[in-house]
Image (cartoon, rainbow, N blue to C red):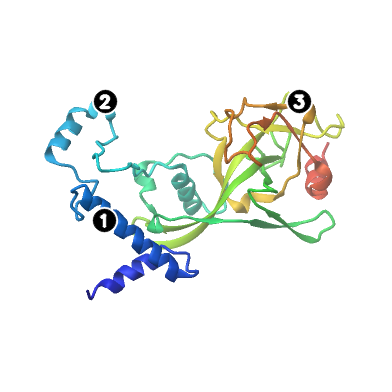
Amino acid sequence: GELQHRRVKRFYARTNKHRSTRQIARLNERERALRSLRADRGVSPTRKLNKYTKAELDVRTRMQHRIHDLPIIPPEAHHFIAESRNSPVNNHLLHRLRKPGQADDGTEYTPQDRSEITIKNDRIYRQRTFRVNFTTYDVRRDQDSMNPRRRADIMMLSHDVDPATGTSFSGHPFTYARILDIFQVPVIYSQPGSSPSTHTIPVLFVRRYELDTRYRAGFQQKRLPRVKFLPATDPTAFTFADPDEVIRGAHLIPAFAHGRTTDYLEHGESIARLDDCQDDWRFYYVNWCVLCYDSILRSHCDK
């Protein structure tokens, strides 16, 4: 009828805007097939799957002590995805908006605080590459390009650096991570007492390394620093990072003599591993030769 143009616009918003006519036709055919299946099963096309009958609600109430926040799934529903504002990305985004320019210190916000942000249209956009500008040791501008498939390791300033002295309590001024994915997140920020504002926040999903403190390294020992992945059981092993915190790309060399291990992440393929590997290298050496000499020497000039 007269409202069919709204239907086409709704389909268009779900395309990637490239050859949209074919994509709209596929979406229309998919919706027609789903309506046909629902009709064959005797389910009303207007019934919403997240609405329960009185009997289902009574059962859900009696079983609340066992299933807590898991609702009864109607037989005609294929699956259920819980809506939650306790996602780590919500915590990271709120920190970026409340404290711009400050490193994420792990502050845990309350659900009431996290309700101030809403991901626009419940969508985030994946990016392929991440580029960062930096200054070389000879005071020239340069640029690194990273992506999750190939050159994915990055270096950032360690959070345990004393602002007064510029020294790190761990003895190493940098921390390292591997980029697993790159996102652009459109966010609606509703501060109390002010009108909502829209922001597009770039976010890196990373797997972090930790410094192997049992291994003595540095200029005096004439050894490269050695790092390893944080165990998957550590809550900070997989986190979100601010692209502004990235200094430049890092060159990490696998310690081949120590072999591979599954101590950090269980055996099997994972997005946290490159090239469809089933396990990880036990250690990596930080190759200072291709990193910024100025950054390395500046952090050791007082030794």
Q: Secondary structure at mark 3?
A: helix
Residues at circles 1 and 2 in contact by the CB criterion of under 8 Å: no
- Residue 90 visible within the image: yes
Seen at 22% across and 50% down, the residue is 40
Residue sitting nearer the eye, 218 or 4: 4
- Can you name the residue that lies furthest to the left here? 54
Q: Residue at x 61, y 28 (%)?
A: 264
Which badge, 3 or 2, is on the more N-terminal residue?
2
Instruction: Where is residue 191? Give x, y as percent.
Output: 37, 56
- Residue drawn at x 21%, y 55% is 45
Q: Amino acid at mark 1?
A: Arg
What amino acid is at disc 3? His
Q: Tag 1's secondary structure?
A: helix
Q: Nearer the viewer, mark 1 or mark 2?
A: 1
Residue tagged by mark 1? Answer: 35
The answer to which of 231 and 224 lies nearer the viewer is 231
Judged from the image, the secondary structure of the residue bearing numbered disc 2 is helix
In this picture, residue 36 sits left or right of residue 242: left
Q: Which residue is mark 2?
A: 66
Q: Which residue is at the front of the view, 90 or 194? A: 90
- Residue 51 location in percent, x, y? 20, 46
Counting residues from the start of the chain, the first of labels 1 and 2 encountered is 1
Q: Are marks 3 and 2 in contact (CB under 8 Å)?
A: no
In the figure, 229 relative to 112: above or below? above
- Please identify the quarter of the rendering in which residue 237 is found: top right
Residue on which the image places disc 3: 258
As drawn, 5 above or below 237:
below
Pointer 3: residues within 10 angstroms few (<14), some, or many (20+)?
Answer: few
